[in-house]
């Protein structure tokens, strides 16, 4: 059963990052704390308890009111004590099972989706984005924490700073309060409690203590924001290698909608350039294809995904493709037969996208997930645009005709094969 409450420890003074509240630092255009709370809320957490210090309490209160989270603040008047003391201060604010997280940890959506279903300490045996030397390591025995600490020489996994606990943990904090006068860490609580361990290996997460780690967190969010399915061969091997780097540079400066508008304008410009400079038109068309991935990457990294954004992006792509093919045909072709070929190329290009979107509408699932064989069929938009650029680098009437004929055959054959695969899967 997913817990309904999350405790977030945010009482640290952030001395290593300029004395700022780390939870309110922005990564990819969003506060770390907003990112954590929004993803937890999406996965069943309904209430938050934030433990902070007196200096930062007004800032966190303003943050809560500004975003409308169901959250309350607990002020730790002694933040110099260990974060275990901050956990203890939340003891009267939770009951039953609850999530415990640190305010300076950045987690991917995939991580949190799985972590809330775990139990005890969530540990990672294959961390990919952290400095192992600085990480808190865990030695595990019989599925429980035996030892925990940064200086462990032998260890089995890394502490992710994410825990699923129950109120019994406060019996441990109560004992440590008496023994250490409040000066103890969460790690000491974990070791004393011999918490059970849930392994969650290789999913993106990291903690942020320094400006360089803030940049690394942005890189992690952008580079892991690539669409999981649906990319064609060119996107996987060329476009994404460029678009993710562009997204990394723009993640704090540009919104997905702004990027969609820029990409659309560049695509339409490339279409009109077919009238005067086909090679440059082809290059700009390919550039627009590369940048077309940026808005989606930004949306996922900035937690701004929405059905409407994807809907508009898809419509604008169709306008760009239609304008490009139509103006290219108008500029080059003279025989009526070749206008028919151009029409088939244009219709096929539209139908490639429509065939998978119609599948989603009819069956309520992503076509590429439901039918993996679709990923291997050639003719997706990124592949068509790349072919178009290649043919237009040395333009002639014959090369344009060959391109249109190839697109007409490739796209319509793909649609036919898509329909056949869907029929075989769903009949």
Image (spheres, rainbow, N blue to C red):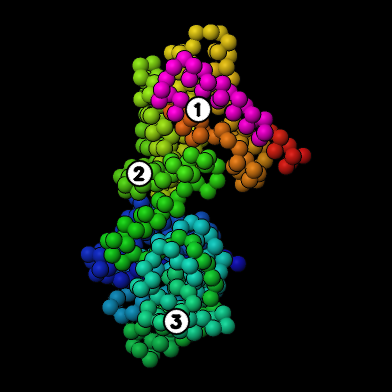
Looking at this view, is 356 or 280 the one in front? Answer: 280
Q: Position of residue 370 (x, y in %)?
A: 65, 46
Q: Secondary structure at mark 3?
A: loop
Q: Residue at x 70, y 38 (%)?
A: 421
Q: Nearer the viewer, mark 2 or mark 3?
A: 3
Q: Nearer the viewer, mark 3 or mark 1?
A: 3
Quadrant housing residue 80:
bottom left
Q: CA distance from mark 3 to mark 1?
A: 56 Å
Looking at this view, is 104 or 278 the one in front? Answer: 278
| Mark closest to the chain's N terminus, 2 or 3 | 3
- The residue at which mark 1 appears reads as 318
Q: Residue at x 27, y 70 (%)?
A: 13
Q: Position of residue 295 (x, y in %)?
A: 41, 40
Left or right, 341 with respect to 27, comes to right
Q: How many marks?
A: 3
- The residue at which mark 2 appears reads as 246
Q: Is residue 185 above or below residue 24?
A: below
Contact (Cβ within 8 Å) of mark 2 with mark 1: no
Magenta stretch holds residue 393: yes
Range shown magenta: 390-418
Q: Could you say which disc has been placed on residue 154 in the image? A: 3
Q: Is residue 79 visible?
A: yes
Contact (Cβ within 8 Å) of mark 2 with mark 3: no
| Mark closest to the chain's N terminus, 3 or 1 | 3
Task: Mark 1: give few (<14), some (14-19) or many (20+) Cα within 10 Å.
Answer: some
Q: Position of residue 194 (x, y in %)?
A: 51, 84
**Which SS does the magenta portion mostly show?**
helix
């Amino acid at each position: 059963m997913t817990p309904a409450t999350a405790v977030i420890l945010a009482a640290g003074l952030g001395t290593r990052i300029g004395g700022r509240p780390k939870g309110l630092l922005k990564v990819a255009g969003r506060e770390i704390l907003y990112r954590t709370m929004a993803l937890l809320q999406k996965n069943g957490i309904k209430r938050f308890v934030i433990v902070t210090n007196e200096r930062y309490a007004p800032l966190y209160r303003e943050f809560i009111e500004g975003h409308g989270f169901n959250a309350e603040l607990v002020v730790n008047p002694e933040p110099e004590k260990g974060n275990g003391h901050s956990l203890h201060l939340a003891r009267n604010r939770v009951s039953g099972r609850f999530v415990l997280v640190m305010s300076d940890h950045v987690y991917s959506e995939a991580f949190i989706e799985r972590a809330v279903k775990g139990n005890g300490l969530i540990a990672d045996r294959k961390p990919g984005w952290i400095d192992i030397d600085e990480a808190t390591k865990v030695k595990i025995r019989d599925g429980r924490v035996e030892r925990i600490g940064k200086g462990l020489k032998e260890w089995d996994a890394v502490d992710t700073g994410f825990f699923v606990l129950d109120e019994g943990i406060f019996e441990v904090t109560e004992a440590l309060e008496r023994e250490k006068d409040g000066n103890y860490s969460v790690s000491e609580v974990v070791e004393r409690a011999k918490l059970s361990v849930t392994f969650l290996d290789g999913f993106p997460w990291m903690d942020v203590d320094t400006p360089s780690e803030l940049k690394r967190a942005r890189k992690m969010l952008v580079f892991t924001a690539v669409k999981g399915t649906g990319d064609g061969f060119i996107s996987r091997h060329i476009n994404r290698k460029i678009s993710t780097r562009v997204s990394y540079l723009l993640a704090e400066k540009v919104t997905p909608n702004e990027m969609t508008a820029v990409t659309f304008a560049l695509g339409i410009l490339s279409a009109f350039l077919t009238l005067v400079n086909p090679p440059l038109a082809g290059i700009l068309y390919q550039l627009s294809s590369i940048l077309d991935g940026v808005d989606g990457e930004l949306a996922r990294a900035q937690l701004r995904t929405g059905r409407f954004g994807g809907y508009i992006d898809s419509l604008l792509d169709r306008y760009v493709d239609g304008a490009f093919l139509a103006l290219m045909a108008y500029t080059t072709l003279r025989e009526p037969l070749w206008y028919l070929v151009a029409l088939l190329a244009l219709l096929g290009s539209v139908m490639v996208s429509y065939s998978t979107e119609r599948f989603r509408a009819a069956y309520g699932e992503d076509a590429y997930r439901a039918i993996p064989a679709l990923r291997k069929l050639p003719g997706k938009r990124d592949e068509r645009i790349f072919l178009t650029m290649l043919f237009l680098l040395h333009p002639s009437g014959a090369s344009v005709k060959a391109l249109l004929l190839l697109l007409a055959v490739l796209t319509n054959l793909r649609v036919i094969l898509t329909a056949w695969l869907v029929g075989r899967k769903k009949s």
